[in-house]
Amino acid sequence: MSDVEQAQMPSTDDPRVEFRRLMGLFTTGVCVVAVETEDTGIAAMTVNSLVSVSLDPRLVCWSLQNAASQFDIYAAAQQFSVSILGDDQANLARRYAGRGDTLLQPDDFAKSARGLPVIAGALGHLECHRWSEFAAGDHTMMFGEVMGLSSSAQSLPSASPLAFFNGQFCAIQSS
Ligand SMILES: Cc1cc2nc3c(=O)[nH]c(=O)nc-3n(C[C@H](O)[C@H](O)[C@H](O)COP(=O)(O)O)c2cc1C
């Protein structure tokens, strides 16, 4: 990195802040992970740590912060859904990045083929069965085996995803 580039990256004494700022330059998509139990109803959380891990079996993984107010609900869930958000869904991404148990709006959700709650109108949905998890620092890596998937007819090939870059939601236009 040149001196000029280094100068453009404000430094801080807290290595966590610097790490977070740097990783904010790694642009991601945005999704909502949702679970449902009879006792607690739907819990949903905005997530950008989703990773496609394996094709055989089909595995995905996301990173759950141990301090999340609804950690126990996600950690115990045997199934979860992933809804990949479009660029017209930043309001939903903001809503489900708020405190978990207060902002849920049932109208935001539809039922997947297997009965999991999914965000209505999202670009695509995954239905996942809990596969494994392991502790990783102040987060827990949640692995799911993909049991089903769907995408909205309009979303391909002209999908316009919601992206997250440098702490902000933004749109990416397909060429
Ligand atoms: C763009 C974005 C991505 C996020 N990604 C994650 C994530 O991957 N894992 C996570 O645990 N929290 C993530 N969060 C934070 C959660 O959405 C948020 O902490 C949670 O919904 C509310 O937690 P609380 O009920 O503990 O307040 C993200 C937030 C935003 C805005």
Image (cartoon, rainbow, N blue to C red):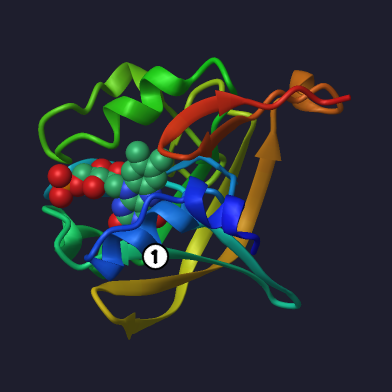
Q: Is the C-beta of the residue carrying label 1 under 8 Å from the nearest atom of ligand 1?
A: yes
Number of marks? 1
| Residue name at image x 53 percent, y 57 percent | 6
Q: Residues within 10 Å of mark 1 (few under 14, many from 20)?
A: many
Compared across the picture, whether 83 is left or right of 167 comes to right
Percent from the top left, x then y, of residue 77? 30, 63
- Figure check: 77 above or below 5: below
Tell me the quadrant of the picture where the N terminus can be found.
Answer: bottom right
| Residue name at image x 40 percent, y 52 percent | 21
| Residue name at image x 17 percent, y 41 percent | 100
- Frontmost residue, 151 versus 164: 164
Percent from the top left, x then y, of residue 39? 12, 50
Residue furthest front as drawn: 3
- Figure check: 54 above or below 21: below
Identify the amino acid type marked 1. Answer: Ser
- Frontmost residue, 170 versus 145: 170
Q: Looking at the image, can residue 35 be seen?
A: no
Q: Looking at the image, can residue 137 be seen?
A: yes
Rendered image quadrant of residue 101: top left
Compared across the picture, whether 134 is left or right of 122 comes to left
Percent from the top left, x then y, of residue 92? 38, 24
Compared across the picture, whether 106 is left or right of 72 comes to right
- Figure check: 20 above or below 102: below
Residue placed under numbered mark 1 in the picture? 63
Tell me the quadrant of the picture where the C terminus can be found.
Answer: top right
| Residue name at image x 82 percent, y 28 percent | 156
Percent from the top left, x then y, of residue 134? 36, 84
Tell me the element at label 1: strand
